[in-house]
Amino acid sequence: MVFLPARRSLHAGDPLWQSRFFPQSPGPAGTYGAVRRRPRQARGVTATVLDGSERRIPQGRPVKRLVRPLRARGATVGLWCACLLVGLFAWLAWQRTVLVDRIFGSAIGCSGCLTTDVLLHDALLLGGACLAGIVGISALPRFLGLILRGLALLCAAMYWGDLATLTTFNTRLRISDILIYGAQPDVVLRHLHTTGQINIGSVLGACGLLAAVFFYLFLPRWASVAPRKMAGLLVFPATAIIIGFSVPPRPYVHDWGVRNVLAANFDIGVAQPYSDGARIAAEGAPPSEPVCAAGVGFRGDIVLLILESWSPYQSMLFGGIRDWTPGLDSFALRHGYHTQMHAAGFTTNEGLMSLLAGVEFLSPVKPFSKIGPFETAWGLENTLPKVLHGLGYHTAFLTSGDLAFSRKGAWLADIGFDYVEGHDHPIYNNHPRLHFGAAADEVLYERAKQYLFDRQAQDRPVLLVIESVSSHHPYIHPLTREASQEAAFRYMDASAAKFLGDLEDAGFLKRGHIIVASDHRAMIPITREEISRFGRGAASRIPMIWAGPKLPRGEHRVLVGHQADMIDSIKWLAAEQFCSERQRPVLFAPAADSQTTGRCAFHARGDDRDVIDVFCPNGGEGSIKLRGDQTRFQSKSGLDAEQTTAIVAWVNRYRILAEQRGAHTPP
């Protein structure tokens, strides 16, 4: 028993007692009516007051007893949240200046030259987000505070994601990419799991981060801070906003990497529409006249091996920077190779669209967030499998990757392959999986040899297209699981060279041809050595090698080669006569070395989606900035005014007609 003094005698019928511990609705004439809800039994200790009656004195719940010390220091908790928010945005800004300086400053030989410009580009965005986050902690209406804190967190998440994307893939975080890859979360999660990016550490870290985000986002009322107490902290974001409005950054040719993440997403020239007049002119322009010539007419088997992310910098033969692909280099020196090849784009899909369907580049007149998988390349007739099918070939596509990702399997069937096979073939059972559920490349090559030799008993020649996967980003050795770019590409080289050697030893090259190409340059930042060696072509140059009885040996220096030339080149090899409207040299033709006229080659940049790089047979080159009717060259060399006008007109027409083809993309 605990005896307490009482200023007032409390008894069961006392309204004060009832109103304090058992709230009731007041009834008529001041009496208490029906209870609103059934009262729960009061917690606490038994107390005897001075009138001798016993009553239970309620006590707080355990959670409330734990929170009570924080509630007592609510303003301090709120101030700490505001300080951490300012520190977070300052750290993000510092990280981006370091990253941009490492990528661009080192490339131009001027360390720290772009730091001020990066901060000026980011000042308005970071200052505004930080200001919203701090004001959201103030004693505002709860709903308004929730919105402001949510905006601050969203900006921080986009900023961090942009840093990670630029570090990993040498491109900016795009809402379009999030929508494209986020449309198949099961494939993405499986990819993250098989590549070791989901583990106990990452899960615990994510849980801790989510807890901190949840606490800040749904900040309790007792942690609110009056604005006057945070006046000192508001100086930092306010200063950043004033500077962002009043001091413009200097112009820079690679502003795609310097401007803030919102500007990189919404200042998009590629989505700028063309006027009706430009569309009418493009649709009414006469198509290029096809040019016909004699072909080789050799109807042997053809193997087209597409190596993931194979790039010149990895090869001593093609780039002279690294010596990670000695096996492929040796095979090329024994047979033939191309040193001036350009990729159409920066992704596997774009590489396949160009190699197999002849697409010059993918830059639709719309935001990239609104394009579908393989858009502009559905329903085409002049595709590699359809052309060779018309010449009597059986056509097949083999990969160890998941064909459901981005509807690759459906697209391959649409362009005419007789047989399409992916990661679900029984031969891959009981083998460890990595990228996109793929087994190691060596298992894929065993399956390819099995399929190829089984088809030899048939009367029809075979076109076998093989797509490797093991050298996909992130770079992990598929057997040892070593996370190393060098290890991944050395494995790619060793397994591919063994496969090519096995075909050579089996006598395949006496009756057939092998072509080895890349889908795109590796999705990592371009180095200073690459820029020095390849110039503008550092982002687009890829290797290519070949072998067979009807193909030339040694180095083949066509002034410009492109993935889209693959269809015409194989048609030249297999048909007695072929016609093409591309007006570019056949990749393998001996006379192509001396050709200096014809259509230029194009590369859609992955770092800046508004830019198309141009490489012409006469040695001229440049970069086109896309912006609807205002599309124009932003830099050039070796091209006169007449040539640049004609090239821009061709690019505009190609994009407008491609947009019309894209309207027929299956849902």
Image (cartoon, rainbow, N blue to C red):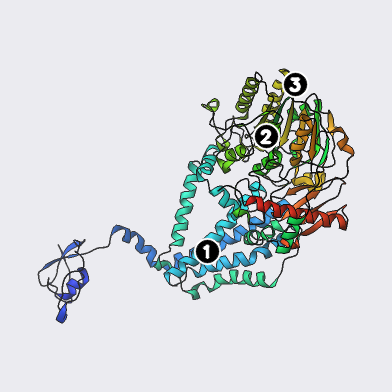
Residue located 69% across and 54% down the image:
609
Q: Position of residue 230 (x, y in %)?
A: 51, 72
Question: Which residue reaches farthest bottom?
Answer: 29
What is the distance, in whole Å, between disc 3 and disc 2 at their CAs?
20 Å
Residue located 68% across and 57% down the image:
270
What is the distance, in whole Å, between disc 2 and disc 1 at their CAs?
50 Å
State the SS at label 1.
Answer: helix
Residues tagged 2 and 1 counted as in contact (Cβ below 8 A):
no
Mark 2 highlights which residue?
385
Residue located 60% across and 37% down the image:
413
Q: Answer with left or right where residue 311 lies relative to residue 585.
A: left
Q: Earlier in the sequence, mark 2 or mark 1?
A: 1
Considering the image in quadrants, where does the N terminus appear? bottom left
Mark 3 highlights which residue?
511
Report crowding for label 1: few under 14, some 14 to 19, many 20 or more residues within 10 A (C-alpha).
some
Name above or below for residue 114 compared with residue 138.
above
